[in-house]
Amino acid sequence: MQTEEILIPITFFVATAVILYNFFKSRHAERMAIIDKGLNEEQLSYLLKTRARQSNNGWSLKIGAIAVGVGIAILIGASVPYDIQDEVVAGLVFLLPGIGLLLVYRFAKTSGEEQ
């Protein structure tokens, strides 16, 4: 086994551990700051609901539009002749998610959501 082959899983697990450590550390620091401010349960529940509403911000819809656009681009690219397949897939992978994001923007704008 070569050195490079063993470094990949080690790097993956170290990166995962660092990300999880920082996530839990920042969450703990945030909770300690809330306790230091002396918020009661009613204020805390309002704060968490407001924060959850702000954190969504339509990201799931945007990511879904991108994923659907890339999937449709790959499906269309698989049906074209082999000699132009690379160019068609490359163009469609940028075109279709872009169209999907424009549709998401149009939908959010007509529904009254602020992005």
Image (cartoon, helix red, strand yellow):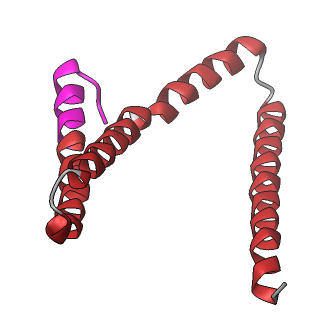
Quarter holding residue 5: bottom right
Is 98 included in the stretch rendered in magenta? Answer: no
Q: Which residues are magenta?
A: 102-115
Tell which of 61 and 77 is nearer to you: 77
Q: How many marks?
A: 0
Residue furthest out toward the top: 42
Q: Residue at x 81, y 46 (%)?
A: 24
The answer to whether residue 17 is above or below residue 109 is: below
Q: Residue at x 77, y 56 (%)?
A: 22
Judge from the rendering whether residue 3 lies leftward or rightward of residue 100; answer left or right. right
Residue furthest out toward the bottom: 3
Residue 50 appears at what percent x and percent y?
54, 24
The answer to whether residue 11 is above or below residue 109 is: below
Judge from the rendering whether residue 78 lies leftward or rightward of residue 42; answer left or right. left
Q: Which quadrant of the figure contains the C terminus?
A: top left
Tell which of 96 and 61 is nearer to you: 96
Q: Main secondary structure of the magenta part?
A: helix
Residue 29 appears at what percent x and percent y?
80, 46
Is 113 included in the stretch rendered in magenta? Answer: yes
Q: Residue at x 28, y 25 (%)?
A: 113
Quarter holding residue 1: bottom right
The answer to whether residue 59 is above or below residue 108 is: below
Q: Residue at x 23, y 21 (%)?
A: 112
